[in-house]
Image (cartoon, helix red, strand yellow):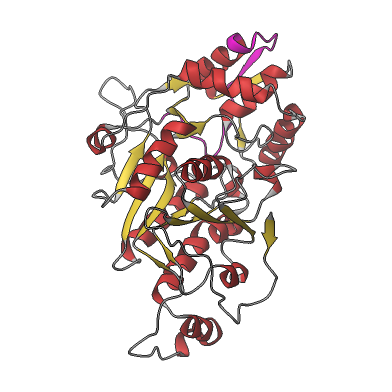
Amino acid sequence: MIYRAPNTDPTILPSCYASEDAQVANFLILGGAGFIGSHLCKRLVRHNHRVTVIDSLLGQVHGAQPQDLPESQVKLICADCSGTEWINETITDTYFDCIVSLAAETGSTQSGYMAQQYVRTNVESLALINDLLINSFAEFSQIRKCGKSLRIPSQPTAAILKTRRVLLASSRAVYGEAKLDSDGSPIASQENDEPRPTSIYGATKLAQELLLATGFHGIETCSLRLQNVYGDGQSLSNPYTGVASVFAALALSGKDLHVFGNGHNSRDFIYVEDVIDVFYHLMTADTITTPILNVGTGIRTSIYELAQLIVTQSKSGSKIRVHSDHIVGDISHNFADVSLLRKVGFEAYTALEDGITRLLAWASTQSLGDAENYLKTALGAYSARGLLKG
């Protein structure tokens, strides 16, 4: 059942469910009804944990229907993660073992002409969590009304939210273009590399990381810099992100696959369940020791190679159309140095061929919609704004 939060400011913080079983943990996930979030929720439920999800169920991300979440142990609140309407449904007295921020507008080029929306969703949602963890309800309400004129009490009452750990789904977009070696070949991005985002989306993810590092006092935090995550459950109709799923929908529909940047652009594709392994470990571990962590395979695959693999596996008659045009905000190359991930004890075990097989098997059971038209609409929006360069 989906609870749709009322469009009013909170006045009362009701009590919420709390586990009497020490083995059961409570988790709060912002954006938990999306692609990665739904997989994470199902993993948590399989281990008998309880989950509260806040998600606005944006049509661009979710399509006509949200992901199927296990209702018995997932409380889904339909609300804007950067707004306050959902606070009534969380509670002062609930302790969350971990809060995970997955809520985000994604799409490097789209962010170039929707900057305010990207900042609101990506940055303000995380800033709100900081404030709820620091302030009591009364203080929070006064801060919203009075702003800088408010004098904070020297001994504040209990914070609205309580947790010991916050995890952020960050992005390889914070790195921007991969560095090149002396031969001009891309070098894997390391966690200590200087961030150089090339899009507003990347800038908002970096802003999230800085918020996490400079706020959230007394709370364990980690920013997971995800590479290109793909797999079953990813939107087949969102042309702004998820190239593997878009290619899958086009190939299964017999439509041409369009590759930009001469086909040489490359990424690090990681299967969603490998990503969930990392999230689950960090959510349930006794402690975490790294503030930033690359999550990828460390393997670089060109977009053209990905298109070939999908066309071959789907046995499609689709043609691969290579364009020299460049989409502003897109990058040529990036892949992860996964040395630190291995030290934490993880390594992606799903080969790209196997992951694409699973993606295609799932996509073949879904309504594919009109992926070609969605793509044309997006490219038209780019061209009209001068974001598609010949």
* Horizontal side of residue 327 vs 380, given as left or right: left
The structure residue drawn at horizontal position 34% and vertical position 32%, both measured from the top left corner, is 336
202 relative position to 254: left or right? left
357 versus 64 height, above or below? above
For the image shown, how many numbered marks are present on the structure? 0
The image quadrant of residue 87 is bottom right
Left or right: 42 as drawn, with respect to 216: right
> Does residue 188 belong to the magenta stretch?
no
Foreground pick, 128 / 346: 346
Write down the region rendered in magenta. 312-333
Image spot of residue 67 (x, y percent): 64, 42
Residue 258 location, x and y as percent?
64, 22
Q: Position of residue 368 (x, y in %)?
A: 73, 28
Q: Give residue 166's position: percent from left, percent from top.
A: 38, 57
Which image quarter is the C terminus in?
top right
Residue furthest toward the front?
A: 21
Q: Quadrant of the N terminus?
A: bottom right
Q: Residue, x 59% and y 11% (percent of image)?
A: 313
314, above or below 299, in the image = above
Of the pair 98 and 324, the residue shown nearer to us: 98
- Residue 332 magenta: yes
Q: Quadrant of residue 267?
A: top left
Quadrant of the rendered structure where residue 278 is? top left
Residue nearest the observer in this picture, 241 or 116: 241
Q: Is residue 67 above or below residue 22?
A: above
Residue 102 seen in the figure: yes
- Can see residue 176? no
User: Which of the pair 258/283 is nearer the observer?
Assistant: 283
